[in-house]
Image (cartoon, helix red, strand yellow):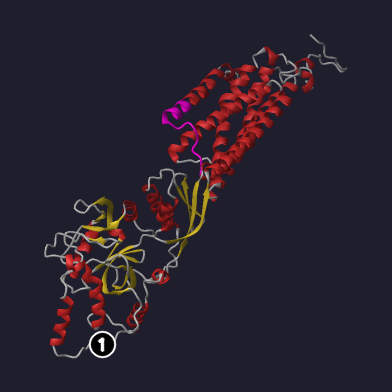
Amino acid sequence: MAAPKKGRRQSAPGKPGRALAFILIALVALTGGMFLSGHTTPRLGIDLAGGTSITLEAKNEPGQKNAINPTNMNTAVDIINNRVNGLGVSEAEVQTQGDRNIIVNIPKGTNEKQAREQVGTTAQLFFRPVITQAAGAATADPSATPPGADKEKDKATDKATDKATDKATDGADSPSSSASPQGRALTDALKDDPTPGASDKAEDGKKDDGKKDETPAPDPATAKLQEQFAKLDCTDKKQRAEAGRGIKASETTIACGKSADGKTWDKFILAPAEVNGKDVDEAEATIRQDTGAWIVNMEFTKGGAKKFSDVTSKLSQQQPPQNQFAIVLDGDVVSAPSVNTTLSKNAEISGSFTQQSAKDLANVLSYGALPLTFHEQSVTTVSPALGGEQLQAGLIAGAIGLALVVIYLVVYYRGLSLIAIASLLVSAALTYTIMTLLGPTIKFALNLPAVCGAIVAIGITADSFIVFFERVRDEVREGRTLRPAVERGWPRARRTILVSDFVSFLAAAVLFVVTVGKVQGFAFTLGLTTLLDVVVVFFFTKPLMTLMARKKFFASGHKWSGFDPVRLGVKPPIRRARRAPGSAGPVDPKEA
């Protein structure tokens, strides 16, 4: 039974060429794939190639204390990633950091200002019916009442809306060519303003009744809102930012927006939202053929179209300004057009848009609103020159580390160092080609920590060679010739190498899972190179060692082979010490 086992055990060294052929074919295939893909260098991260890194911090909205959760954070990551990619930035990285931060890494060549606006804009879009509209300056009388109860308020409203009235004709399907600079939502039936004087007639009708106004006094909440509206000064940037902050979509609010001339501000009291940005299925920036102006076309979802139709049906029966529909984006009134008939699936935002502003608005509308409000915590910009210096420093550090390892191997292992150096070169080639291919496939970017991981991997790979060499040399010290020593030393070395690499890979995996940001680059590279170490040792180092053991230079124990019997302190052959007959006296082994 012993003979067959021995035969099977020794069959492996007879075919080391198969393993070497496998590793050679894999290396050629990876290199060919690298050139075919058109990517011959690894994709570099921001810290090496240059770019902008933006850190966003999530904030809870009033009344939504538990809004910051993994689901909303992941949704925000997807939306921000779509927005940035919508700018044509295919290599941007968006990922969470901790439980409330999002890191956005944008490579060089991107418009930093535009990118910051895109990732930081919440894009909360609501369609709210207008209750009242007035000039943006603060009102002296804080007890202002809604329109229909105060002639002065109606005059202010008429003044803010009559400018667009002159060009509104009885052709309801032909919108006015003079749109507000901030944009107006227009469809075939969504015009600038209705026929003037409608509100005056409505008020005259009330007077003709001869009845005293029996409108009850507003409740405290309404009175407070009216007071806030009266005091609101939309010409003040700070007040515009604070107007309506923290108000839910289901609540009445106040807001500011540019007036029809685009030079002054109007203020509004707006009813609860009837339609929101989630009901927008698609938005696209296009040029309007009749005016040549940039517009944003919106198409609602099936549910959104139903809601839009219902609310426009109601608004079309109201008197101005209650027939206006305010489009509110992140608390600002983008436009407040009038509605004269029922609308359904499509709407249009037009006005004095530039090409870029129209595309930006269409971008945020298409990809939806962020589920959370984010504040820009920090912005770091790395110039390409600084990134190049860091890459050069990393490569120099790697070269120094590799040189020290090679020197140690040459001094200590002599001829065996050739096998170790060849194995290191194969491992480096595999690592380079795989990292290059991972760039276009999974967007892997080689950052500075990843370079550090590759440098550490040099020591891990060299350690595997040393374990194997020392096991073989131990067998040679016991008096065995080189070829049997290689085969007897390999099983023990193999177990040690696998355990060591498993521990390294486990550490890399844990580090990758529990960390975020650039540290993950270190963990990923360390794990990758650890796996490649196992592949190289099994399919290159061991087969090559088997072939070299057949060469006279190594098998004869040449002093430069690394197996010099004198330097290793080789013992006399074990079998010769057993030749003595079973006598009581000592027996001196004879040399053959």
* Nearest to the observer: residue 332 or residue 197: 197
Q: Reply above or below: 339 against 489.
A: below
Rendering coords of residue 209 (x, y %): 13, 88
Q: Quadrant of residue 590?
A: top right
Whether residue 338 is visible here, answered yes or no, is: no
Locate the C terminus by quadrant: top right
Direction top: furthest residue? 592
Residue at 19% across / 68% down in the picture? 165
Q: Is residue 187 visible?
A: yes
| Image quadrant where one finds the N terminus | top right
What residue is shown at x 13% (from left), y 65% (from top)? 169
| Residue 38 belongs to the span the image colors magenta | yes
Q: Is residue 234 left or right of residue 496?
A: left
> In this rendering, would 148 be left or right of 364?
left
Tell me if mark 1 has few (under 14), some (14-19) or many (20+) residues whose alpha carbon lies within 10 angstroms of its own. few
Considering only vertical position in the picture, is 333 above or below 227?
above
**Above/below status of 97 relative to 149:** above
Judge by depth and name the residue closer to the eye, 562 or 428.
428
Determine whether, in the image, residue 169 is placed left or right of residue 18: left
Residue stretch in magenta: 29-45
